[in-house]
Amino acid sequence: MMNRFFSRFSKDLGIDLGTSNTLVYSKDGGIVINEPSVVAINMRTDQILAVGKDAKNMLGKTPPHIEISKPLTNGVISDFEVTEKMLKYFIDKVHAQSFTMLARPRVVIGVPLETTEVERKAIEDSAFSAGARKVHLVENPLLAAIGARLPLSDSVGTMLVDLGGGTTEIAVMSLAGIVTWKSLNIAGEEMNKNIVQYARDHYNLLLGERVAERIKMRIGSVIAQDEPLEFEMRGRDLLSGLPKEIIITDVHIREAIERSVRIIVENIKATLEATPPELVADIYERGIVLTGGGALLRGIDTLISRQAAIPVRIADDPLTSVVRGAGLLLDNEDLLKDISLPSANEGSVI
């Protein structure tokens, strides 16, 4: 009865709680929030100063009493209190135009493959504390497959690689379940660190994290391009301590991230080797699907296809596959019950 009451005033939500970005899908409005998973905190007053884009813009520019927190590490909550406040901010923002003081939505949240029961409980508790009345946790590759409109419930093999910010998740799925999988802590943020380290080692240049990410997005590639790409790399000279700018090319970035990319490709091949032959035959026919922000790295689909000898395609709008899958699940109760992980809060009063 209370569920019916709250459902009249709340918008059901699908949430992709990512290491780099948090996306929120509203049943009524589609994707309503796409913001960095970053929070700015005033340590003197313990108050939240900014969340999302505003907080990310403060990175590397704050006085000592303002701390920039990334409350998720590899898709898992590392700071419970800050995550709760961030979720509450986003949930309240979605309901801001509904003129209700009582936002108690039903929520579907994507979680990484390797989450423990303790980590799942932390995510559930954060969502409940932020105002959710019901929380469903679903593994990210399943949501990404639904968002990419793959035939998840059919008896055919589907292989999906979700190249996120904190984790790369490789999964072979059939009959609405995951048959074989691998999860790596090597993804977009690790590649940013590779670029920072490359600049330090080769040019004695200290880069900021945001600068490295911008360089990766502008000229990052994993195979040679038809035309050379160039971009300015600005930072602090480690020898003189003064500002310095050099022109860097896509060749340098390929060299910087080569090891991380190689590990991802090797793990894709290892997952295929552990997959039953009937499913491998399906994958060979249907190809591998890439989702996540890393799928936008130039040439990643071509490189994986060459190395694995299997067709590879990038999902439409790969950045939003997980949250769109969560949103679609809100309208499919049977499938939601089938693929949701067991609640770590059984017996909780909702």
Image (cartoon, rainbow, N blue to C red):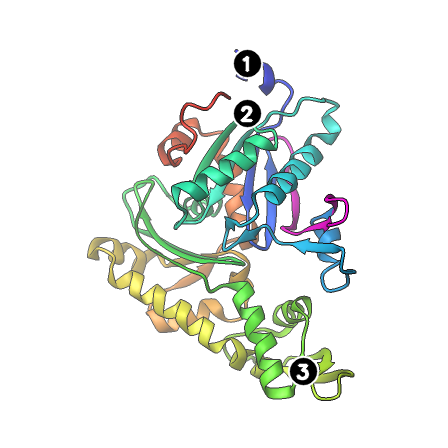
Name the mark nearer the viewer: 1 or 3.
3
> In the rendered image of this protein, does residue 102 appear above or below residue 57?
above
Mark closer to the chain start, 3 or 2: 2
Amino acid under disc 1? Met
* x and y, in percent, of residue 306 in the image: 38, 73
Q: Is 9 on the left-hand or right-hand side of 193?
A: right
- Within 10 angstroms of label 2, few (less than 14), some, or many (20 or more) residues? many
Highlighted range, magenta: 27-49
Task: List the residue tagged with mark 1.
Answer: 2
Task: List the residue tagged with mark 2.
Answer: 133
User: What secondary structure is the stretch in magenta mostly built from?
Assistant: strand
Residue occupying image coordinates x 27% and y 43%: 155
> In the rendered image of this protein, does residue 54 appear above or below residue 337?
below
Residue occupying image coordinates x 75% and y 29%: 97
- Residue 205 - label: 3
Q: Secondary structure at mark 1?
A: helix
Q: Is 265 on the left-hand or right-hand side of 166?
A: left
Residue occupying image coordinates x 30% and y 41%: 175
* x and y, in percent, of residue 102 in the image: 67, 22
Q: Distance of mark 1 from mark 3, alpha carbons? A: 59 Å
Query: Mark 1 and mark 2 in contact (Cβ < 8 Å)?
Result: yes
Amino acid under disc 3? Leu
